[in-house]
């Protein structure tokens, strides 16, 4: 493969790379794909390849750490 003078991140990621990219393990990526929190991979011949941009969008849509707790506190204060 010819070397490129421009450095850029790959668009397609393997399962392990996708997991590292979003900061979790491969098994959790599988769970998140199954429950819809992360996108399914694309198929390139027999390979499963995750789109880095789709991972970014899905990751941005994940709830923040404190959002669930704040909702519970709000409900408790209304009662």
Image: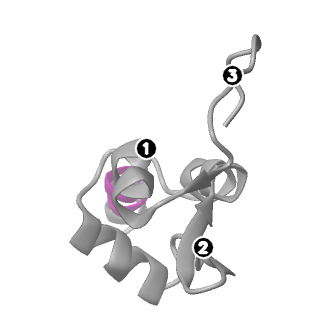
Mark 1 or 2, nearer chain start: 1
- In this figure, which residue is indicated by the disc labeled 1? 21
Mark 3 or 1, nearer chain start: 3
The CA span between labels 1 and 2 is 14 Å
Residue at figure coordinates x 63%, y 41% from the top left: 10
Residue at figure coordinates x 31%, y 54% from the top left: 69
Residue extending farthest top? 5
Between residue 28 and residue 2, name the one nearer to us.
2
Q: Relative to 60, does residue 14 appear above or below in the rendering?
A: below
Kindly report the secondary structure that dominates the magenta region of the rendered protein. Answer: helix
- In this figure, which residue is indicated by the disc labeled 3? 3
Left or right of 13 on screen, residue 29: left
Residue extending farthest front? 1
Residues shaded magenta: 68-72
Residue at figure coordinates x 60%, y 73% from the top left: 39
Residue 66 visible in this rendered orientation of the protein: no
């Amino acid at each position: 493969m010819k070397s490129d003078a421009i450095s850029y991140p790959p668009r397609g990621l393997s399962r392990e790379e996708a997991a590292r990219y979003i900061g979790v393990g491969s098994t959790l990526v599988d769970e998140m794909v199954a429950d819809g929190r992360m996108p399914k991979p694309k198929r390139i011949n027999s390979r499963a390849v995750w789109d880095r941009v789709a991972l970014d969008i899905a990751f941005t849509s994940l709830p923040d750490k404190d959002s669930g707790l704040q909702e519970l506190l709000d409900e408790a204060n209304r009662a």
